[in-house]
């Protein structure tokens, strides 16, 4: 069996309503990924609180994230988690608290510490969201290694992808293994005002 994951993202101006823009992006993602209309009435939650869509005989998985200026949705045919973070300043004690010892040592050597921290953070959160367990998994218990070519390594189950954008960082995790993950597709969505 092959799997796919489509990622759609858009930027948000401060005056734009985050909830309305998120719903608009979900609607776009559902139509372009699955050929179906997104309806809030068709969303239910699992016992862990993770939403899922009940309106189709095939399993439909999705996840939503929004940073200050960045909104992203992942639509997939397997469990998925996504995190999007706008570029921003990060306090050093927040970095230290959420990193493994190895990650913290790597960050100390980094010439772009805040960007590299956001890369790690979005990977951690995409994994926590994919599992449906969220922050019941302590972020400092999820470790990643990033090399200069962008290769992501982790002991955690899942396939990870990361996208460095002018607006920020998007990381995605799907449950299936690398041999079955056919492709990831990313698209920036822009609407006319």
Image (cartoon, helix red, strand yellow):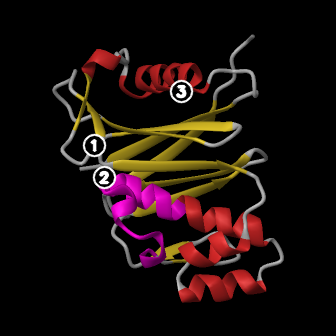
Q: Looking at the image, is mark 3 or mark 1 nearer the viewer?
A: 1
Based on the picture, tell me whether residue 130 belongs to the magenta stretch. Answer: yes
Image vertical order of residue 7 relative to residue 53, above or below: below
Q: Position of residue 89 (x, y in %)?
A: 78, 59
With 146 as the anchor, is 74 left or right in this view?
A: left
User: Which numbered dot is residue 75?
Assistant: none
N-terminal label among 3 and 1: 3
Res 71 visible: yes
With 14 as the anchor, is 94 left or right in this view?
A: left
User: Which numbered dot is residue 49?
Assistant: 1
Tell me the residue that label 3 is attached to. 22
Report, in whole angstroms, how far the alpha carbon at label 3 lies from the one at label 1.
Answer: 18 Å
Based on the picture, tell me whether residue 95 belongs to the magenta stretch. Answer: no
* Nearest the eye: 134 or 26: 134
Report, in whole angstroms, how far the alpha carbon at label 2 lies from the one at label 1.
Answer: 7 Å
Q: Residue at x 67, y 75 (%)?
A: 93
Q: Secondary structure at mark 1?
A: loop
N-terminal label among 2 and 1: 1
Q: Residue at x 63, y 43 (%)?
A: 67
Q: Position of residue 155 (x, y in %)?
A: 39, 79
Res 181 visible: no
With 69 as the anchor, is 8 left or right in this view?
A: left
The chief SS type of the magenta part is: helix
Q: Residue at x 69, y 17 (%)?
A: 191
User: Which numbered dot is residue 132?
Assistant: 2
- Mark 3 Cα shell of 10 Å, populated few (<14), some (14-19), many (≥20): many
- What span is in magenta? 123-142
* Nearest the eye: 189 or 96: 96
């Amino acid at each position: 069996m092959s799997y796919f994951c489509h990622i759609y993202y858009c930027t948000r101006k401060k005056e734009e309503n985050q909830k309305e823009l998120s719903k608009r992006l979900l609607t776009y993602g559902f139509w372009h990924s699955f050929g179906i209309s997104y309806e809030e009435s068709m969303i239910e939650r699992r016992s862990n609180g993770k939403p899922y869509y009940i309106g189709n005989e095939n399993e439909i998985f999705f996840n939503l994230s929004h940073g200050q200026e960045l909104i992203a949705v992942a639509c997939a045919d397997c469990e998925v988690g996504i995190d999007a973070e706008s570029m921003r300043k990060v306090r050093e004690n927040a970095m230290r608290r959420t990193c493994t010892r190895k990650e913290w040592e790597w960050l100390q050597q980094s010439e772009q510490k805040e960007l590299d921290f956001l890369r790690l953070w979005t990977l951690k959160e995409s994994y926590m969201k994919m599992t449906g367990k969220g922050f019941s998994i302590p972020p400092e218990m999820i470790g990643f290694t990033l090399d200069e070519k962008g290769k992501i390594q982790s002991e955690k189950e899942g396939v990870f992808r990361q996208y460095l954008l002018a607006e920020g960082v998007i990381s995605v995790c799907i449950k299936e293994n690398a041999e079955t993950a056919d492709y990831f597709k990313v698209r920036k969505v822009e609407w006319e005002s």
